[in-house]
Amino acid sequence: MQRALQSVTPEMLEGNAGVKNLCVGVEATAQQLSSVFERYGIQKMDALGHVFDPNHHQVVTEIDAPDKAPGTVVQVLQTGYVDPRSLAA
């Protein structure tokens, strides 16, 4: 949903009630989903800057980042979510 909202330019919104209404609907849906996640304890994963963990991250490509240790996540393409209760086992 965030990608959909990010893809809308100010020019697309200007004078286009259909696009504005669509964005309002997507934002409302994202808010409701976030509320449900919060209610059930599902949390966003904060991967940026952390060491890559194949149990929790999916890698698309490796990027050279001389100022970071090898294996450090330097870019997040899609936010992941986790239920902390599933990690307790």
Image (tube, rainbow, N blue to C red):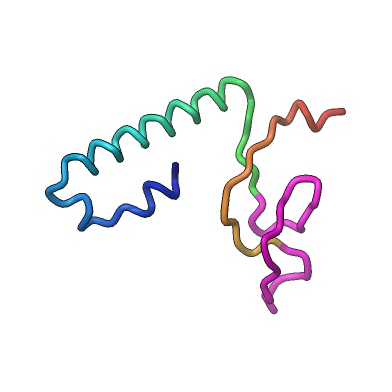
**Where are the magenta residues, as a range?**
47-72
Classify the position of the C terminus by image quarter. Answer: top right
- In this rendering, would 49 be left or right of 16? right
In this view, the residue in front, 60 or 83, is: 60
- In this rendering, would 85 be left or right of 23? right
Residue situated furthest left in the rendering: 15
What residue do we see at 69% from left, 61% from top? 73
User: Does the stretch in magenta take in 13?
Assistant: no
Residue 51 placed where, x, y %? Answer: 76, 58
Residue situated furthest front in the rendering: 18
Residue situated furthest top in the rendering: 39
Residue situated furthest bottom in the rendering: 66
In this view, the residue in front, 60 or 70, is: 60
User: Does the stretch in magenta take in 49?
Assistant: yes
- In this rendering, would 7 be left or right of 59? left
What residue do we see at 57% from left, 20% from top? 39
In this view, the residue in front, 17 or 87, is: 17
What residue do we see at 24% from left, 43% from top? 19
Q: Dividing the picture into quarters, in which one does residue 80 lie?
A: top right
Q: Is residue 51 above or below residue 68?
A: above
Classify the position of the N terminus by image quarter. Answer: top left
In terms of secondary structure, what is the magenta stretch mainly? loop
